[in-house]
Each structure stands twice: as structure tokens, then as C-alpha cells.
Image (cartoon, grey):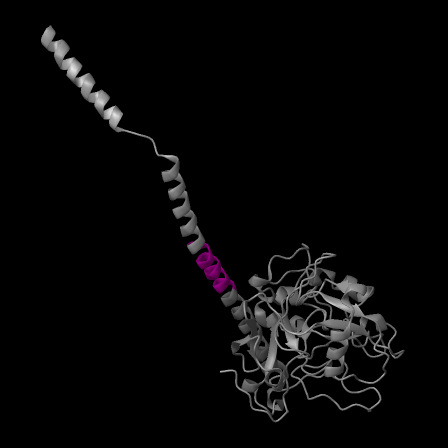
């Protein structure tokens, strides 16, 4: 009996010794572990974010490439690239002039596997108030993934067919074909113009030396916060009936007191409609540069003059350091913010005599 008690006592003593040898994690050790984990997260998080942005950026570039391929398919079928403003309103019926026409993006829908959506577009009724807008509402409110850059973020307003990509109107500060009174020089010919459809052969500088499209951030659709590159202030009339140069408009934008004028925050509102607000940009400044704004035109020539605007609408994006640009031969290149303005503007003409390569 005593031998059994002795054996049990030894086992209990051994077990007690083992228990005494175990101890909890001290506060200092816990803090050290947490610090190490924090450092690892700090190192990994930027890498994860960078990888995600790289994926978004690649998709954004691919969308622009698809647009380029569709433009060429359209040109092959019709003999010309689409104009920035297009309609098929019958002769004798009211046309809204330079505002609220159909955009090039609308015209290339069949070449983006969007035939069903294209069939919803009523080209005989330009999308202006009230009849044409109502007739094209279903198409206008439909979202097309190819027209949305993932880096641009989610649309703050559901139910709108938003747009992240713009056709290049070059040196034009307004969608007019030539000066109203002939007193100012006609700007160098851009790749896309209102009601002017160009053939590939018309690009005398070469398709590979002409930027046809790029990106522009959407507006944030909120009052108060100002999204640079997407929102833009609205100035009053420029007090001129002539065609202001792009530099004159840029200077006016720079001089604008932005704290005392309204701000437009609905940029990129629709892929369907023509104009700077929706589907075009100009080379007023370089990528992500300058101070964009818009002015009403001081003329009685148009009844809806509040909607016909001069302005600076630069290419912009959420990508660090630059924007994607589609050359008219279909290639897509990343253009840095540091590109010289003269070079950027040279790439925006079809017949300026410059031969600029983005390679």
C-alpha cells in the first residue's frame, strides 16, 4: 500500500513540476508580437494596394483598346470614323445644334457586341429635351462596362450610364467647326470634331502619331467636395462672339475665383451624349494638369446657349502619374503628367506637320 502511495506521490510531484514550468505570455512579449504583425501588415498593404491598382489600370487600358478596335471596325464599315456629334434627324425637323447629339461611343456599340443596346438608340431623335431624351432614356441609363475605368471608382449614382473615356477634340475650346466671325485663326485640326467624320486617310500626320482618345475622371455628384479632374467650376460669359483660343480659355480658367462660382459635379454623366461634359476632352493643359472650368458662350446664335460652353476639359485619371491614351492606330500608351504641353498638343492634331512618337 505504501509503495502505491509513494508512486502516486511521485507522479503528482512530477505533474506539479511540469505545471510550475509553464507560464503565460507576458505583456512585453504580446506587445512585441503585435508590433511585428503591424510591421508585416505595413509592408504588405502597399504591395496589395499596388497589385490591385495594377490590375485596375490594366483593365482600364484594355477598355480603351477595345474602344480603339471598335472605332476601326466602324471606319472599315462606313469609310469614316464617327464625328463627336452625330444624329439622323430628318431634314426640316428641329435639331439642337451643337448640344445633345449622339457621341462616337454610341455609334460604335455594334462593334463592342452591344447590338441590342444600339437598337434601343433612336438616332432620328437627338437626345435633347424633351422628346429625344425620353425616347433614348433606356439606352442612356444603361451601364456599359467597357466605358468604365475601374480606377475611377464606383458610380455614386445608380442607374446612370456613366463614362470614363473621352474622344480628343484637340485645340478646340468649344464644339464649333470654325470661328463665328472669321477674326481668329482656325485651330489645328483635331482627330474628332462636331459633325465632321474623318477617314483614316485624312490623318496626314499618321494614325500612329495622333492621340484619338484618353481618360477623364467622372464627377463626384456631391456638393461641397471638389474632385479635381472630374468636377469643374462654371464661369459666366466670356463676352466674346468670336472663337476664343484654347490659351485664352485656359487663362480665363486660371483667373476664375473658384470660391464664388457654382461647380458642376456630374461630369461623365452619360456615354450616349456628345460634348465636353460627357464624352470629349481637349488639350487645354497636359494630363491631370491645369485648372479646368467652363464658360457659357456669349452669343444669341443658339437658343440653348447656357448648355453650349467653352472650356478646359483635360485628360485625367486616378492612376498615379498619368493617363492612358489611345493612338488612332489602336495602340494604347501610358502618358505621364510630365509630358511637355507642346508635345501633348502636337499629338492632338491630324495635320499639324509634327511627327511625335509616344514610344
Q: Give the vertical position of 284 relative to 8 (above or below).
A: below
Q: Which residues are magenta?
A: 44-56
Which quarter of the picture shows residue 103?
Answer: bottom right
Residue 51 placed where, x, y %?
46, 61
Residue located 78% across and 64% down the image:
259
Q: Which of 156 and 63 lies nearest the eye of the viewer?
A: 156
Residue 2, quarter of the rendered image: top left
Report whether 151 appears left or right of 277: left
Res. 262 in view: no
Indicate the position of residue 340 as horizontal and vertical percent values.
59, 82
Q: Is residue 213 above or below residue 19?
A: below
Question: Residue at horizontal 72%, vertical 62%?
Answer: 266
Q: Which residue occupies the foreground of this view, 12 or 192?
A: 12
Q: Position of residue 178 (x, y in %)?
A: 77, 87
Residue reaching furthest to the left? 3
| Direction front: furthest residue | 28
At x 71%, y 72%, the residue is 292
Report the magenta stretch's main SS.
Answer: helix
Q: Quadrant of residue 287?
A: bottom right
Instruction: Describe residue 179's horizontal placement relative to residue 331 as left or right.
Output: right
Query: How far across and how far down the image is residue 339, in percent?
Result: 57, 80
Task: Pick the quarter of the image with the N terminus.
Answer: top left
Amino acid at each position: 500500500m505504501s509503495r502505491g502511495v509513494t508512486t502516486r506521490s511521485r507522479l503528482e510531484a512530477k505533474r506539479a513540476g511540469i505545471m510550475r514550468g509553464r507560464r503565460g505570455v507576458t505583456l512585453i512579449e504580446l506587445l512585441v508580437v503585435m508590433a511585428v504583425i503591424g510591421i508585416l501588415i505595413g509592408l504588405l498593404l502597399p504591395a496589395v494596394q499596388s497589385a490591385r491598382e495594377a490590375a485596375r489600370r490594366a483593365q482600364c487600358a484594355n477598355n480603351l483598346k477595345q474602344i480603339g478596335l471598335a472605332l476601326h471596325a466602324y471606319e472599315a464599315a462606313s469609310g469614316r470614323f464617327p464625328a463627336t456629334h452625330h444624329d439622323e434627324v430628318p431634314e426640316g425637323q428641329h435639331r439642337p445644334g451643337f448640344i445633345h447629339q449622339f457621341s462616337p461611343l454610341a455609334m460604335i456599340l455594334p462593334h463592342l457586341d452591344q447590338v441590342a443596346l444600339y437598337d434601343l438608340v433612336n438616332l432620328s431623335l437627338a437626345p435633347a429635351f424633351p422628346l429625344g431624351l425620353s425616347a433614348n432614356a433606356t439606352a442612356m441609363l444603361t451601364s456599359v462596362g467597357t466605358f468604365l475605368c475601374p480606377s475611377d471608382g464606383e458610380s455614386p449614382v445608380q442607374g446612370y450610364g456613366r463614362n470614363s473615356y473621352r474622344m480628343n477634340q484637340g485645340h478646340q475650346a468649344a464644339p464649333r467647326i470654325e470661328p463665328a466671325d472669321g477674326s481668329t485663326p482656325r485651330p489645328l485640326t483635331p482627330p474628332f470634331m462636331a459633325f465632321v467624320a474623318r477617314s483614316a486617310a485624312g490623318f496626314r500626320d499618321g494614325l500612329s502619331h495622333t492621340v484619338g482618345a484618353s481618360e477623364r475622371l467622372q464627377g463626384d455628384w456631391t456638393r461641397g467636395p471638389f474632385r479635381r479632374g472630374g468636377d469643374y467650376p462654371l464661369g459666366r460669359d466670356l463676352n466674346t462672339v468670336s472663337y476664343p483660343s484654347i490659351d485664352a480659355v485656359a487663362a480665363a480658367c486660371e483667373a476664375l475665383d473658384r470660391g464664388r462660382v457654382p461647380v458642376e459635379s456630374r461630369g461623365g454623366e452619360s456615354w450616349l451624349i456628345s460634348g465636353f461634359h460627357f464624352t470629349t476632352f481637349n488639350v487645354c493643359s497636359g494630363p491631370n494638369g491645369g485648372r479646368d472650368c467652363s464658360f457659357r458662350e456669349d452669343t444669341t446664335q443658339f437658343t440653348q446657349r447656357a448648355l453650349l460652353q467653352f472650356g478646359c476639359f483635360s485628360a485625367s485619371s486616378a492612376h498615379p502619374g498619368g493617363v492612358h491614351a489611345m493612338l488612332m492606330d489602336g495602340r494604347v500608351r501610358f502618358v505621364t503628367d510630365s509630358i511637355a504641353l507642346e508635345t501633348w498638343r502636337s499629338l492632338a492634331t491630324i495635320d499639324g506637320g509634327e511627327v511625335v512618337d509616344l514610344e
